[in-house]
Image: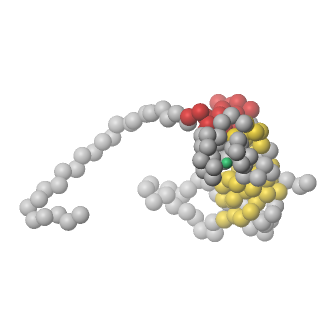
Amino acid sequence: MTEKPGQELLTVEIARPRPYRWSTGKYLGRLYKEAMENKRLVTNRCPKCKELLWPPQAVCGRCKVEAGEDWVAMSDKGTVIQYTYLVFPLWDPHYGEKLANPHPTATIKLDGGVYMVHFLEEKDPQKLKEGMRVQAVWKEKQEERGRGLGDILYFRTIEE
Ligand SMILES: [Zn+2]
């Protein structure tokens, strides 16, 4: 935007908090509820192609049919497909603070067959590897849960 000569721009500062409630809806809401109440991941299945939809969805993107209520409880174990870890500190560009989460980020294929992106507990680059087996570590206190996949702290390496 270019300021024209003689044009004065007004600045309006809004400093009021704006609390709001956001409905997760029927399908995503079920995932949030199961995570919060039972530390369990669920999703629904397409009635036509039988594929698991992830996250739970109202319509199958492939078949364009209503997904419905065929709910499936999924394992919270999976396999690391790829991961990323930081070798330098990351700074929040808005506040200049060092970002708090030091955990590597990974794409994890859950045993049910769906992919999710989440954190890994393991921070030692020598111990990180593709194909490592992991399991979700859930927030213990129910009052701290209610954030869907945010109810999982990270995925811990497991031996099988
Ligand atoms: Zn389908």
Q: How many marks?
A: 0
Near-viewer residue (53 or 145):
53
Q: Residue at x 34, y 37 (%)?
A: 16
39, above or below 134, in the image = above
Near-viewer residue (88 or 105):
105
Q: Residue at x 55, y 63 (%)?
A: 90
Q: Quadrant of residue 8?
A: bottom left
Q: Residue at x 89, y 55 (%)?
A: 159
In which quadrant of the rendered image does the N terminus lie? bottom left
Q: Where in the figure is residue 133, as x and y percent of width and height?
A: 82, 57
Q: Residue at x 80, y 44 (%)?
A: 75
Q: Where in the figure is residue 85, as x and y percent of width and height?
A: 66, 65
Residue 153 seen by the camera: no
| Furthest residue in direction left, as rendered | 6
73, above or below 107, in the image = above
Q: Is residue 65 left or right of residue 22?
A: right
Near-viewer residue (45 or 150):
45
Colour scheme in the image?
secondary structure
In which quadrant of the rendered image does the C terminus lie? bottom right
Residue 74 seen by the camera: yes
| Furthest residue in direction right, as rendered | 160
Q: Where in the figure is residue 27, as x and y percent of width and height?
A: 62, 37
Near-viewer residue (120 or 63):
63
33, above or below 91, in the image = above
